Amino acid sequence: MLSIVVFLPVLVALALAALPASSDPRRYTVPWVVTGLAQLALVTVLWLQLPTVGYGFVEQVAWIPSAGISYHLGVDGLSLPLVAMTVVVFTAAAVYSLREGRRPKSYVLLFLALQTVSVGVFVALDLILFFLFFDLSIVFMYFVIAGWGHGARARSAALTFFLYTFLGSLALLLGFILLYLAATPHTFDIPALAAQNPLAAGGPVAGAALLAIGLGLAVKTPLVPFHTWLPPAHTEAPAAGSAVLAGVLLKMGTYGFIRIAMPLLPASWRQFAEVVVVLGVVSVIYGAVVALAQTDLKRMVAYTSVNHMGYILLGVGAAGLVAQSDAQARQLATTGAVTQMVSHGLITGALFLLAGSLHDRGRTYDMSAYGGLAARTPRFAGLFAVAAFASLGLPGFSGFIAEFQIFTGALAATPIATAVAVVGILVTAGLFLLALSRMLLGELRYPDAPGTPRAFPDLRARELAAVVPLLLLATVIGLAPRFLLDVVEPASRVVNELVAR
């Protein structure tokens, strides 16, 4: 069943590839939407039948046995919420793209392939299989940005994205090989490596493995100072591409820290947890302050992603600092980090889709070009305000639940770093309030409006159908998070027990 969830999109892509080219985008986008809904139904079944402890729906077949590589899939409370979030974000992107008129066949085929590898990353239980899905996501997103991005700079932004993240993936592979060589017998199997703990004594090899894996994941996350590929990639990507890039692909980095770095290198993780905390706090403050200085809406949201990913690193780093002293604190911090991944995927995906809707009408992301949209486009204004308040961590939304857990779990271990990180929330609140004031309030302004502006319609049905479910889910998690926390907490407890060995 798990293989069906993973490969259903690429099977649909193969079927669509056999169709003759057509100018009607719905010939391709409607099957994409249906695929996402079918995946979501399957994920719901997985959620309802997930075992409380350990991996569920495990599939393992020898792939390259001489090298210790297998086709090994499975889900637990850390991965299944991210699988569900991935499917929801891709389905929202599909609905948003129903009228995509630029080479719709190639567009949908690329996104379907990207959908398969994105789900694959979160269910892979073999390091090489994880690396394969991880690397292919870079390739497919490169073509999305280069082929459907905005303006002449799209290819340059796509190339920068590819080179940065591909270099990071090579470092990741080096770390995987060091783990493989340290294991007896040699294996790339994640549960087997966690059980063996081949680098339990720490030392130079363990430190080198953590450095290589951490570098590869930090680029993908991205953390400061490895973040410079992110703003141009988001600015030039199409709206659906930005939603998937921020909502899903960034989580591959943070998920890798929890699934691979923490349980497979516990001694080194504890040793260098303070460095992880510092990198997280720097990303929190830097991302918020730089976002505050932006006049481009998309770049502003991109920098808030750096800020929000920093909170996740603060949480997992703090879990390493209290690994052998406070079980409740480390579980809170780790659970909060996973919740933040889900929350950020939903909220930031909605923000980028709303930014794309604005660009479709005004042909610019410059916030100073707009004004008075609350009176002219009340549906857009209302949803953008909800997304902004959700992103800044207002109580009642998923971001508050996540950040509260992270700060509570981290406070005892690293009070100064936690206090500094809280400042990031204040800056984030300021930048979103400033954006709301610039675009929604004041006199009516339009990007091309010397005299008589052209029509500036409010959100259409497909745009509402794409954005509303994302924000609705973020609200449900914020008001009734138990259904998510009941799944995440047992798995985070297992990871933290491995880190504390």
Image: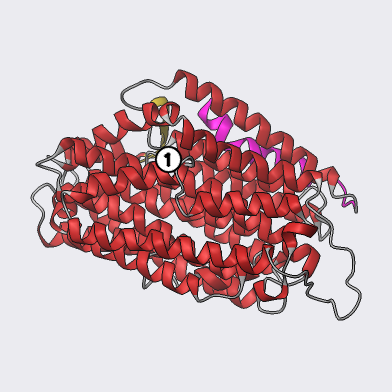
Q: Is residue 230 visible?
A: yes
**Left-right relation of 278 to 141:** left
Give me the residue at 73% from left, 44% from top: 464
Give me the residue at 31% from left, 55% from top: 313
Display coloring = secondary structure
Q: The residue tagged with tag 1: helix, strand or loop? A: loop
**Magenta stretch, overall SS:** helix
Quick check: 296 above or below 100?
A: below
The picture quadrant where one finds residue 211 is: bottom left
Amino acid found under the numbered disc labelled 1: Ala
**Left-right relation of 67 to 239:** left
Give me the residue at 58% from left, 43% from top: 116
**Left-right relation of 222 to 380:** left
Quickly name the residue at label 1: 124
Q: Is residue 17 magenta?
A: yes
* Location of the N terminus (image quadrant): top right
The picture quadrant where one finds residue 204 is: bottom left
Q: Position of residue 345 (x, y in %)?
A: 52, 48
Q: Which residues are magenta?
A: 1-22
Q: Is residue 163 magenta?
A: no
Q: Is residue 169 visible?
A: no
| Residue in the foreground of this view, choosing between 304 and 293 | 293
| Residue in the foreground of this view, choosing between 238 and 75 | 238
**Left-right relation of 283 to 363:** left
The picture quadrant where one finds residue 306 is: bottom left
Q: Position of residue 425 (x, y in %)?
A: 39, 59
